[in-house]
Amino acid sequence: MYQPEKLKARRKELKLTQKEIAEELGISFQAYSAWERGIKEPSKEKVAQLENILKVAKGYFTQIEIVRLYNSLSNQGKEKVVLYARNLAQEEQAQKVADMSKRLYEYRVYERMSAGIGASVYGDQNFDTVYFNEELAHDFASWVSGDSMEPKYQNGSVALIRETGFDYDGAVYAVVCNNQTYIKRVYREEDGLRLVSINPKYKDIFISYEEDPRIVGIIVGNFVPMEG
């Protein structure tokens, strides 16, 4: 891959002007200038001439520096480079993990909500503290239990809820009824709410308006907690 910045740097090291090099190559100043700016690339023949004029090794302007240096080493030297690079990569990966853990955001997750047959509504307001590497807007968070909303909402994941009431049919909401909380797709019908699971093995649940169901809010996100 041609690297124009190396061409410019080497020319300046030798205190040569663009015009001087262009004249040696037998091309116009504008053509050479385009090479240094990366607008155009020199042909293989011209690259070879540049290597000769600027007194650099073959491949200096076209190879990534580390590749060029690696190829110039003995087999023993290459083994040392690979070992060093592998160790360095492991160190940097460990540092990335450490940096990521520093950027974790805290969430208070309340009593499990039902993604199956129902679970009790928040009573004593006990909560678990969990962490995630994104700060997601929400009003409150709760656990998802059950597999009725998989694959989108996994058992043991955290559901993020915005207290908006009903918005539109087919969205996923937290619904409270008879001291139970459900996470389902909700459809408003004439006589009540139809709660639909994503997992096809579950049947729809119908809750009559006479049972006074309350749509707490829409599910605006979910995540699997990370270790803090």
Image (cartoon, rainbow, N blue to C red):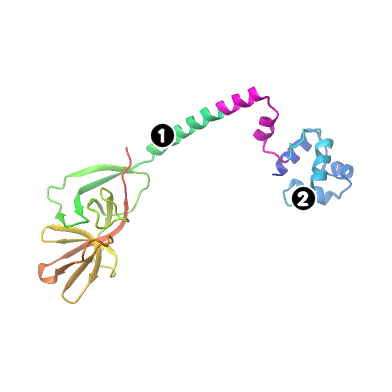
Q: Amino acid at mark 2?
A: Ala
Q: Is 30 displayed left or right of 1 in the figure?
A: right
Q: Residue 111 — which label?
A: none
Q: Is 217 displayed left or right of 100 in the figure?
A: left
Label 1 secondary element: helix
Looking at the picture, does residue 209 appear above or below residue 176? below
Q: Amino acid at mark 1?
A: Ala
Q: Is 178 displayed left or right of 45 in the figure?
A: left
Label pair 1/2, CB-CB below 8 angstroms: no
Q: Residue 34 — which label?
A: 2
Q: Residue at x 72, y 39 (%)?
A: 6
Q: Estimate the spatial distance between the alpha carbons at disc 1 and disc 2, rounded to whole Å.
A: 44 Å
Rendered image quadrant of residue 68: top right
| Number of disc labels | 2
Question: Which residue, given by chain and number where applicable, does mark 1 sit on?
Answer: 98
* Front in this rendered view, residue 134 or 58: 58
Instruction: Assess whether residue 65 is covered by the magenta stretch.
Output: yes
Q: Position of residue 24 (x, y in %)?
A: 89, 42
Instruction: Assess whether residue 210 is covered by the magenta stretch.
Output: no
Q: Position of residue 34 (x, y in %)?
A: 77, 50
Q: Position of residue 62 (x, y in %)?
A: 72, 41
* Front in this rendered view, residue 213 or 77: 77
Q: Main secondary structure of the magenta part?
A: helix
* Front in this rendered view, residue 103 or 88: 88
Q: Mark 2 Cα within 10 Å, few/some/many (few <14, many 20+)? A: some
Residues shaded magenta: 62-83
Q: Residue furthest front?
A: 201
